[in-house]
Amino acid sequence: MSQLGSLEELPQEYRQALAAANLVPLWPSLRALLPPGSPATATAVTHLPWQVIRPLLLRAGELTPMEKAERRVLVLSNPGRGLDNLQASSVIYLGMQLVLPGEVAPNHRHTPNAARIVVEGQGACTIVDGDKCPMEPGDLILTPTGLWHEHRHEGTGPMIWLDVLDLPLMVYLDRSYAIEGQPQRPRPLPAAYGAGGLVPLRHGGRSRADYPLLRYEWRAARRALEALAESTPANQTIELAYVNPETGDAPLNTLAFSALMLRPGQEAALPRMSAARVFHVVQGAGKATIAAQTLSYGTADTFCAPGGAAVRLANASAGEPLFLISADESPVQRKLGVFETWDA
Ligand code: 1HN
């Protein structure tokens, strides 16, 4: 592949004439824009240890009242993507949110899609489109684009969860905005999708067709992983996709989620994929090797893998299973026709 001309080798007065006309030559940037063979990514392997973020978040609870924050969140800024970028990857935002007893994070709706993975606490709920979703550790709760949502904490102790949003993408698209709302009148969450393979038969359309299921209980996910483990060969990865039960698609337009289990001592090489991926440890401890970097994680840690990276996970415990939830940006890449996978 030939070496292309640089900006510096062009005459100064020509460069000035281009700049004055809001023009730039393509050829000095062409190789950076279209790298030969594989894309460049600024996304770095990043580890967010629970032991680090929890005390900092509790401190935010002392320093900043809810009225001054609306959402009290510490957000990951991926060190590869520049200072204060609030990005885990090009699509994914990751933030750890704290709600203290008695607090309410007020009702609003916005264009970005969001999901929460509950980390610590009891007695809070997220009300989404009128449905009251109780929050138990390990639960995955959706707040899809455009749906009203607010959080209320009626328990004791701090309530903490991981927010996963497609905010960087929405900001890039100039489509990010929110609308404030009045408090919702919550109704109990219907248990209409509690049995695998069975969905409510309705003869007139569905009420919220795109997002029939808003809360994926950890209890059920864990039970399903343990059941799958019984019929999965010892060397194979035990992984379940969270899906829209009506369509089988990823639960959000932009983000896919899965639950993983590693048996005691198990190592798993995940299929390599072009989408960036984040992992949250629901329970257990182990090691990850991502693009030749190694990190050790424990319960409630979160870590990021850039798109295209080889990911190996290991359960460090000889006695306990390891459980993780992952989120990735593959739905965006699939819709754009640029999603790729490679054998591990
Ligand atoms: C949001 O609505 C929440 O509802 C959390 O809890 C984090 C980050 C950016 C934009 C909206 C929430 C958010 C957010």
Image (cartoon, rainbow, N blue to C red):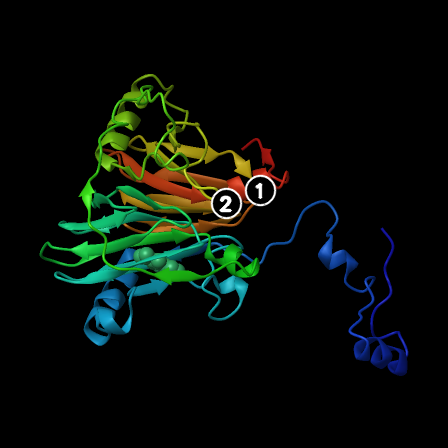
User: How many discs mark residues in the rendered view?
Assistant: 2
Image quarter for ligand 1 equals bottom left
Side (left or right) of 37 relative to 340: right
Query: Label 2 amino acid?
Result: Glu
Q: Is mark 1 within 8 Å of ligand 1?
A: no
The residue at the far front in this view is: 204
Residue 118: x %, y % from top left = 26, 48
Q: Residue under label 1, please give it.
A: 333
| Residue in view at x 21 percent, y 44 percent | 132
Q: Which label number is shown at residue 329?
A: 2
Cα–Cα gap, marks 2 and 1: 7 Å
Side (left or right) of 28 relative to 98: right
Residue 172: x %, y % from top left = 56, 60
User: Pointer 1: residues within 10 angstroms few (<14), some, or many (20+)?
Assistant: some
Answer yes or no: do the residues labelled 2 and 1 have beta carbons within 8 Å?
A: yes
Tell me the quarter of the picture where residue 29 sits: bottom right
| Residue in view at x 58 percent, y 39 percent | 335
Query: Label 1 amino acid?
Result: Gln
